[in-house]
Amino acid sequence: MNATTEKRIALISVHGDPAIEIGKEEAGGQNVYVRQVGEALARLGWQVDMFTRKVSAEQETIVQHSENCRTIRFQAGSLEFVPRDNLFEYLPEFIDKFLQFQRENGITYELVHTNYWLSSWVGMQLKKIQGCKQVHTYHSLGAVKYNTIETIPVIASKRLAVEKQVLETAETIVATSPQEKQHMRSLVSTKGNIDIIPCGTDIQQFGSIDRQAARAKLGIEPDAKVVLYVGRFDPRKGIETVVRAVGASKLRESQKLQLIIGGGSTPGNSDGIERDRIEGIINELGMNDITTLPGRLCQKVLPTYYAAADVCVVPSHYEPFGLVAIEAMASGTPVVASDVGGLQFTVVPEETGLLAPPQDVPAFTDAIDRILMNQEWRDELGKAARERVIGKFSWDGVASQLSELYTQLLEQPVTPPVVQTLKQTLVKPTVKTAVEPTKQPALLS
Ligand code: UDP
């Protein structure tokens, strides 16, 4: 670590803008992770620059979050939202803008922490160009995701190859749960360094209001039985499972059962289509009178919803970590979750909530009913849930583990860059794919 770059970190999140509204299409856990990690690292004295892609002319180029923490947006391709599966071809332009930014500001980042496979490719090229060190968090693994969806996108083979390459070449991969690490080893590669550092949550904000006050604020009866879902409208989130499970609940006849489905959607977009589908199921099951869909819940109002609920359900088909589970737990609310991925790490069955096989409606109904029908046990689970989050999953705790990792890496000797110019890097693509799924990135002049 030299004097000029001491405690400076670039967090790269090409498609997950840390400065935008959370809860809409494609904006979820990764955006929250990058923003929260960035702000917590800044509190620990790091100079944090978070890089993302600008999606409209109205967006500010630089958003200052705190004295040492800012989001910097680069135009790569046209100024519009591009789904992540179509973003690869714009990455060389993103790298070009990054290098230009460094030149103009007299900064060379010795360490980059990349997020999601697209940004990992950016990090691998920067590593070759300027010999920087790379830490990477996957947020989602293609090898796992493609097992859970029916239509495999054309970009799949490229993504799998990039994910293998970054695991084998980055200084450190951050797995957010032991389950994610195990998947990397069994499905991606046995080579490469993996550290487990979980995701975190704001333990002051979540848990700041008690159930009575939260219900009074939201106009919910004190004796209602409230089941809550929070998250994006995406078929893989399994909202259908929670709707059908609540529909089959033994408490269904009671007027007091309520289902709240929180999350934003945009008509015509893929999340709008999923919302329409879910509303269709609610209609079909005659659940209109017990279900509310309040739309996107901002981070300010979320603690109130979690606190008001008797149980929060996370029915995802797969989840590498699952922030919603720990947010609910931090709020003293037990979680019923799918028995998959990071949820097996955060939720301790019979202690902080219950796990059920994904998409298994009867198992979810049974788990939800067990909690709703025993208030005393529900409260014990909720208390243990909050304690677990305080002990293991606070952002400050997560950031100090990352800070330690970064410091160790910066103290290690620098490897000289493999190539000198970006042009050379891109002329010799490092990733070979079985089939050529998309246009190769355009070469920079
Ligand atoms: N979220 C939100 N408002 C909403 C829905 C979701 O702020 O209306 C937030 C939620 O609190 C969590 C994140 O979006 O912090 C979702 O992260 P998670 O890891 O659960 O799922 P992902 O979206 O990454 O698949």
Image (cartoon, grey):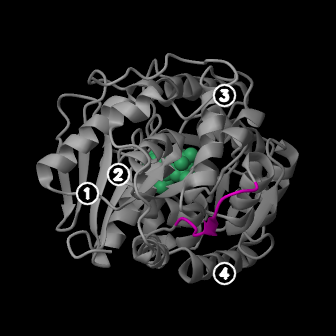
Q: Which residue is mark 4?
A: 384
Residue 168 image point, x, y percent: 63, 52
Q: Quadrant of residue 161?
A: top right
Residue 108's disc is: 1
**What secondary structure is marked by label 1?**
loop
Direction from residue 366 to residue 166 in the image, left or right? left
Which of disc 4 and disc 3 is earlier in sequence?
3
Q: Between tags 3 and 4, which lies in front? A: 3
Nearest the eye: 187 or 428:
428
Q: Distance from label 2 to label 3 (Cα)?
A: 27 Å
Q: Which residue is mark 3?
A: 157
Residue 130's disc is: 2
Q: Between tags 1 and 2, which lies in front? A: 2
What's the residue at 55%, 22% (across, down)? 273
Quadrant location of the C terminus?
top left
Query: Tag 4: residue type?
Result: Ala
**What secondary structure is marked by label 2?**
helix
Residue range (magenta): 190-199
Quadrant location of the N terminus?
bottom left
Nearest the eye: 231 or 171:
171
**What secondary structure is marked by label 4?**
helix
Which of disc 4 and disc 1 is earlier in sequence?
1
